[in-house]
Amino acid sequence: MTGLDLTSERAVRCGRFVVLPARKLVLNGDTPLRLGARAVDILLALISRPGQLVSKAELIATAWPESVVCEANLRVQVSSLRKALGSRENDQTIVESVPRQGYRISLPVVAVEGRVTPRAFRSIPTVEIHFADYCFRPAQRQLTSAGRHIRLGERANIILRALIESAGTVVSKNELLARAWPDMAVDECNLRFQITTLRKFFGETAAAGADRIIVNASGRGYCFAAPIEIKESHTTVSMRALNHDSRVLEEQIGA
């Protein structure tokens, strides 16, 4: 097979796993695997060309399109893929390394006829955090304001949550980088991009000054300045919302 269309709603079978590209979900039986956004992107790139070499440069460009990262980050994500998928199936290496070049998926990959529906809903406790005119639901990566629902990207959600957890105090840039990009070496510009994107949703400009929700602490980090109110609720959240990747969602921030 020389190229597989992963843009449709159709599921794809790769060995014993079923991949739902549009939802960025990987199923083992009826159970979704807990894979991060980068790992799923890498898997999709590999299964789009089953049995063929995909270069390290291509995989890095796919998983980190707006970041400058070192090759070690790719190795971390491939390692997490192998941990989730297992190292071998039917005496075949699932994700095969090609020394100094890249990786290939060695299992057969075929399109699945019909619709695949996992156990789509799960009831989980969640917390609503209210500030200014906004409601933030971290478990769903959702911000709501005036009836508008915004799904946060994984990094933006982590950063906003970290700032709210320490509301009123400065959170260092190093701490935010470590939380949003664990086991990765990324430039500080990636953090600034996520902060800027959050501020755009809040309607903040450079002239906002002291009225900003997220305030700069020059040379140190950022501080969440708005008063907050925390409410507990119990919400049914779809697996789509639980998935680690935000790009499948209707509207997003900082994916």
Image: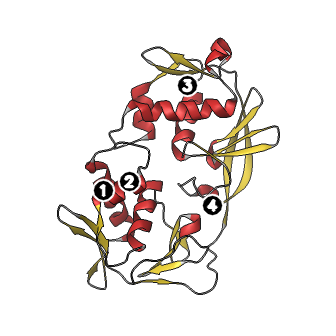
- Residue pictured at 30% horizontal, 72% vertical: 104
Q: Who's the residue at 75% across and 26% down the image?
A: 132
- The part of the image, by quadrant, that contains residue 103 is bottom left
Tell me where residue 146 appears, x and y as whole percent: 82, 37
Q: Residue furthest front?
A: 2
The secondary element bearing badge 1 is classed as helix
Q: Do the residues labelled 2 and 3 touch (CB within 8 Å)?
A: no
x%, y% of residue 237?
68, 57
Q: Nearer the viewer, mark 3 or mark 1?
A: 1
Rendered residue at 41%/66% (across/down): 45
Q: Which of marks 4 and 1 is in front?
A: 1
Tag of residue 166:
3
Disc 4 residue type (three-letter) = Arg
Q: Find disc 2 in the rendering and name its residue.
A: 61
Number of other residues with Cα within 10 Å of mark 1, as a class: few under 14, some 14 to 19, many 20 or more: few
The amino acid pointed to by label 3 is: Ser
Compare residues 108 and 16 and report the one nearer the observer.
108
Between tags 3 and 4, which lies in front? 4
Amino acid on which the number 1 mark rests in the picture? Ala
Q: What element carries label 3?
A: loop
The vertical placement of 71 against 53, above or below, is above
Residue linked to disc 4: 240
Q: How far apart in space, not on screen, are marks 4 and 2 (Cα)?
A: 24 Å
In the drawing, what numbered circle is on residue 57? 1
Point out the tag, 4 or 2, that comes first from the N-terminus: 2
Cα gap from disc 4 to disc 1, whole angstroms? 29 Å
Q: What element carries label 2?
A: helix
Q: Earlier in the sequence, mark 3 or mark 4?
A: 3
Separation (CA) of disc 3 from disc 1: 38 Å
